Image (cartoon, rainbow, N blue to C red):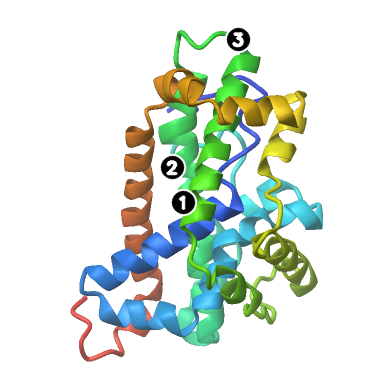
Amino acid sequence: MRRRSAPPGIVEDMPTPFTHLHVAEQILLAVAGNGRSPLAEILAAEWPAFYLGSVAPDVQAVSGMPRTQTHFYKIPPDPDNQAYPRMLAAYPELADVTAMPLAQAVFVAGYSAHLLLDLVWFRQILLPYFAEAPALGDRNHRSLLHHALLTYLDKEAYLALPETAVSTLAAAQPTHWLPFVTDADLLSWRDLLVTQLQPGADLQTVAIYAARLRMPSADFAALLDNPDWVGTDLFGAAPIAEVHARFDTAVTASVQLIETYLEPLLAKYPSYDG
């Protein structure tokens, strides 16, 4: 099968850290609400580790590592590449959850869910709504819409995060959880995000994406603050209800992934029905 590609310039960015944290919260809600109480208990017991895992793949922002070394695929990804199986194949010590501390296992589960969401974004949102849509104009306009949606979802996620988000992330203490990323880099990435989660902190997403779009931050912010532009141009290209539905799909798939990965631990619970 031939890989689907996208015009250069709009594929570098995936959902933001705040979006990944919001999805982590949705995963826990889904687990708690579908009767998988042992899984909910395991995640809750090491919730800071899952929180850090859900944002850890983007550590290259501070480590300088190539993205392929943290995400386990090239852009565009092969159709059969789900990323997290390749991570476990490359580092088999991460595959045996019975041989690692519970916090590490939960962290790797969160890491895997991040990889899954990024691929859902690429295949089910970026490609059909931006890269392959025939009537969106040139590459610059497609990139503007793509980054506008990422920024809209970033703010939506930030506003939905519980007040405990900052203390939860700050409590994560990696101890050799990844053989391919140092604890120092994970802690630097954690601390950078904790700073941005502090009450009253300035959100950086608009400025970061405006710079990548080579436009003034004020102009990019003005578009996002314009309900007519958002409703007509942005949601006309990517209907927000459909985008949310893709995220729901990712949450469901993540629960299945996490349950499969942690199954050797879940089997120890008498109430687990498999």
Query: What residue is rendered at 74% in x and 68% in y?
Result: 191
Disc 3 packing (10 Å; few <14; some 14–19; many ≥20): few
Q: Quadrant of residue 168?
A: bottom right
The residue lying toward the viewer, choosing from 203 and 260, is 203
Compared across the picture, whether 210 is left or right of 42 comes to right
SS category of the residue bearing label 2: helix
Q: Which residue is mark 2?
A: 120
Using the rendered image of the protein, determine whether residue 142 is visible from the camera's viewpoint.
Answer: yes
The residue lying toward the viewer, choosing from 122 and 69, is 122
Q: Residue type at mark 1: give it.
A: Leu
The x, y position of residue 166, in whole percent, is 61, 70
Q: Residue type at mark 3: give it.
A: Asp
> Badges 2 and 1: C-beta atoms under 8 Å apart?
yes
SS category of the residue bearing label 3: loop
Of badges 1 and 3, the one in the foreground is 3
Q: Which residue is mark 3?
A: 138
In the image, residue 85 sits, relative to residue 156, either above or below, namely below
Disc 2 packing (10 Å; few <14; some 14–19; many ≥20): some
Query: What residue is rendered at 37% in x and 68% in y?
Result: 28
User: Which of the image's four quarters has the N terminus?
Assistant: top left
The residue lying toward the viewer, choosing from 217 and 68, is 217
Tell me the CA gap for discs 2 and 1. Answer: 6 Å
Q: Which mark is residue 116?
A: 1
